[in-house]
Image (tube, rainbow, N blue to C red):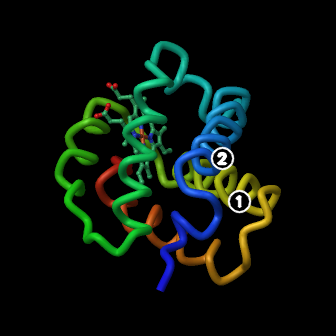
Amino acid sequence: MESIFDKYGGNDFWQKVLNEFYETNIKDHRLTQFFESADIGKIKKMYKCLLASALSDQGDPVHVSIRRVHNPYPISQLEFEAFLENFDQVLEINRLRVEDKVQVLTIVNSYRNDVVKQ
Ligand code: HEM
């Protein structure tokens, strides 16, 4: 069966989605502080690798490093919710089918405990 990653056009599609997602995050007053001095290009690249791997059913090799890279940031449950909400909106705008959107958001949500500190 074709993976969600490939089904919507693979790399180019997800690159566009992530561009829109991080534009939203940077402008979101709830999240701005975290991204002000971050290397967004690098984050998008890594995040795309992560999605490609998770959405292609190739397992999930990255839990540990997600915890490590977010360790210095005091990210709260509310901020994590804002991040998920923004991703939900961008996936909606890019016309993911509801069941595919739920699957993508479930994967992202599975990192909650690696990212949230308080
Ligand atoms: C409120 C939620 C989040 C905030 C505020 C946040 C913030 C950040 C920041 C500031 C960085 C840069 C770290 C650095 O280079 O030192 C980063 C990197 C990254 N984040 Fe997040 N993040 C959030 C949630 C997530 C989630 C849920 C995922 C995955 C599902 C994720 C995936 C990544 C990846 C892959 C990187 C790049 C890591 C690397 O450079 O090796 N983030 N994030």
Q: Looking at the rendered structure, which numbered label has been put on residue 59?
A: none
Q: Along the horizontal axis of the image, is 8 left or right of 118? A: right
Residue drawn at point x = 60 percent, y = 34 percent: 31
Q: The residue under label 2 is which amino acid type?
A: Val
Q: Is residue 5 left or right of residue 98?
A: left
Q: Position of residue 41 (x, y in %)?
A: 48, 24
Q: Quadrant location of ligand 1?
A: top left
Residue at 31% x, 38% y: name it: 70
The quadrant where residue 93 appears: bottom right
Observer-nearest residue: 55 or 35? 55
List the residue tagged with mark 1: 91
Residue 57 rendering spot, x and y as whole percentages: 35, 75
Vertical placement of residue 71 versus 95, above or below: above
Residue 63 place in picture, x, y as percent: 23, 57
Q: Which residue is mark 2?
A: 17
Looking at marks 2 and 1 on the same chain, the residue that comes earlier in the sequence is marked by: 2
Q: Amino acid at mark 1?
A: Leu
Q: Position of residue 7 (x, y in %)?
A: 60, 70
Depicted 92 relative to depicted 42: above or below: below
- Residue shown at 20%/40% (left/top)? 68
